[in-house]
Image (tube, grey):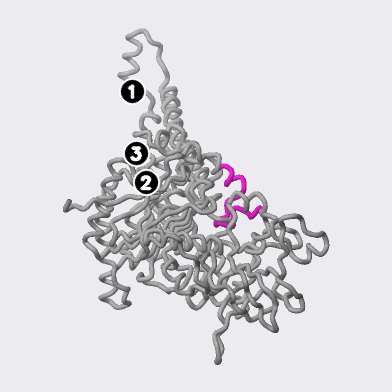
Amino acid sequence: VTSFIAHGLPSHDAALCRDRGFQSIPGSFFAELLLFVVLAALDFYFFANALALIMQKAWLREFNSLGLQIRPDAAKLVTSFLQECDDPQKTVGELVEGTKSYMRSKSGVVGSVIDKEVVEAVISVMLSNSREGVAEDTIHEVQGLNLGDGIQIYNSLTDVGLYKFSQSTKAWTRSQTPPTFFAASDSKAKIYANRYHILLQRILLEGNLVPEAHAAQGGVLPGQRVLTPVESLIGNPGRKLTFGLLSREHDELSRRWVIEDLHKVFPVELEVKEVAHLTTDGSFVLAEGEMVGDAFRVYSLDVPAAVPRSTSMEKDQMPLQAFGGSLTDEQLQMLQNAEPQNPDGMYVVLSEVCLDSVRVLEMLTDIFQGYEAVGPPTAYVFMGSFCSASFVPTAEGVKNYREGFERLKFIMRGLENHVRRGTRFIFVPGPKDPGAQTLPRAGLPDYLTSDLAVDIPGVVMATNPCRIRHFSRELVFFRHDVLRLLRRHEAVPSKQPETGLAEQTLSHHQIEMVRFLLDQAHLVPLPLEESNVIWEYDHTLRLYPLPHAVFIGGVNQPFECLYSECQFCSVGSLHRDASFYAYYPVKDVLETCDVPDRAG
């Protein structure tokens, strides 16, 4: 090229031009023309690279604005992918949303660092959805405001805030003090103080009970009753209705019942021989009686009834964020508006999934393959224990525990329709699984689960309890044998069905246990020495306002019931009963499912 530019057109080519009638063209003209072409090519090359650099900076800003950091090798992959797209600006938005949804499905929250493997997985799903039309036909994404597919899984230790009711402003506000594991001694008393305020606020919602101070000022309407504080019972003659905590006081000489509120404690003489509803040690009660000497003699005892969620939201105006997460009211409204376009979401709920059992692994294989063929659910919720024997923290114990998840990982490979659907596999630890036996419990670590959450898309190692927001529906999953423990702490015998039939007696007890949990607005309304709650995390076990559905896994027989507009389900043991539940949150439909025996 340099020689051509320096010497112009060769002499024989110039003569050929003259012979054919062309005028002689100076060699310098061709040199300038070639120089122009070369410079234009160089300009195009640099322009293309500059355009790619500008594009890269543009989509990097998209990631950075959402708090996501991308590694260099992942950045190169994104750039090359966008250069091949017809509409890079639109595609980068889908890529960011897809990345956040993928990270949320992997760990329950959005991770901050994006590596090459994550980008490859997201691009693969995007291309697959584009070819088969999955994104448009079967999965209705919630567009805008960064809501992914409308499913939010909350970590009880980090995502559930403490809300308190202010008497001065008559509003619920979130506490600005983060909870700690190493709480001061006064935090123990605050557990019952906070529960007292919530239940008292709920009691007064419907206007059937009026505080004594308000009644003295404005009188009492027909049908209303006066509620006297425990501290005001002394020196207040006659029968009174009071609200307080019923518990056993243990001392060196006796174990006596007492009733207390925030300021006073009185011994209780229980004259009532049986009650209409289950009442236990450590529960809040409505007690009617009178002071006799220094003791409060009780003639009638009951538990303050739960109020439907609709009533709580209308009259109490508890912020929806109290359930968990930090979504704005606008985002929550958008989730609710998107429900009609997403009616078919389904949760498969199983308990006591012992992975060291060959029979359980066979049942899981049949369940996975069945849903792989007919259509994967939104999520599986597996509640422990994941081993039939208690975890032993030795080398052999760790090896045996990990082997169960290795077998499960092998079964879960190849579920292409599940991956394409974005199905989540949520694991909630049980009493025999590794970890501190306190509530709430942290999720199982990757090491002990053989990196299942790393190798299988959609796996979430959740806390216990686990809270899930499905669009606007609030779901609580809890693994605990609380239903078995309630009768052990019964304060006064509850009335039995008049017929005395075994089936009716069992059903009555089951309904009473459900009623008691929801009436107390708490997952473990037992004495603290039995519940083992971390003091400053007690609010993560609350059930106020009532969620749309509560699932409790345990050793009890499976049953379900509807109480105060809340769907309650006791999930039996998959290992023992070969049964599980399928729940459709938007339709509010609960189905009992059985796994057929392979032997017939």
Q: Mark 2 or mark 1: which comes first in sequence?
A: 1
Q: Disc 3 designates what residue?
A: 128
Name the residue furthest left.
599
Q: Mark 1 or mark 3: which comes first in sequence?
A: 1
Q: Is residue 97 left or right of residue 257?
A: left
Q: Disc 1 designates what residue?
A: 10
Q: Are marks 1 and 3 in contact (CB under 8 Å)?
A: no
Q: Amino acid at mark 1?
A: Pro
Query: Which quadrant is the N terminus positioned in?
Result: top left
Q: Amino acid at mark 2?
A: Pro
Q: In the picture shown, does residue 64 fall above or below 192?
A: above
Q: Secondary structure at mark 1?
A: loop
Q: Tell me the mark number nearer the camera, choosing from 1 and 3.
A: 3
Q: Point out the stretch of residues depicted in magenta.
A: 317-334
Residue 580 image position (x, y, % from top left): 34, 54
Residue 115 image position (x, y, % from top left): 40, 54
Q: Disc 2 designates what residue?
A: 377
- What is the distance, in whole Å, between disc 2 and disc 3 at their CAs? 19 Å
Q: Is residue 325 magenta?
A: yes
Q: In the picture shown, does residue 508 fall above or below 273?
A: above
Q: In the picture shown, does residue 64 fall above or below 272?
A: above
- What is the distance, in whole Å, between disc 1 and disc 3 at their CAs? 57 Å
Q: Secondary structure at mark 2?
A: loop
Q: Tell me the mark number nearer the camera, choosing from 2 and 3.
A: 2
Number of numbered tags placed on the structure image: 3
Q: Is residue 59 left or right of residue 186?
A: left
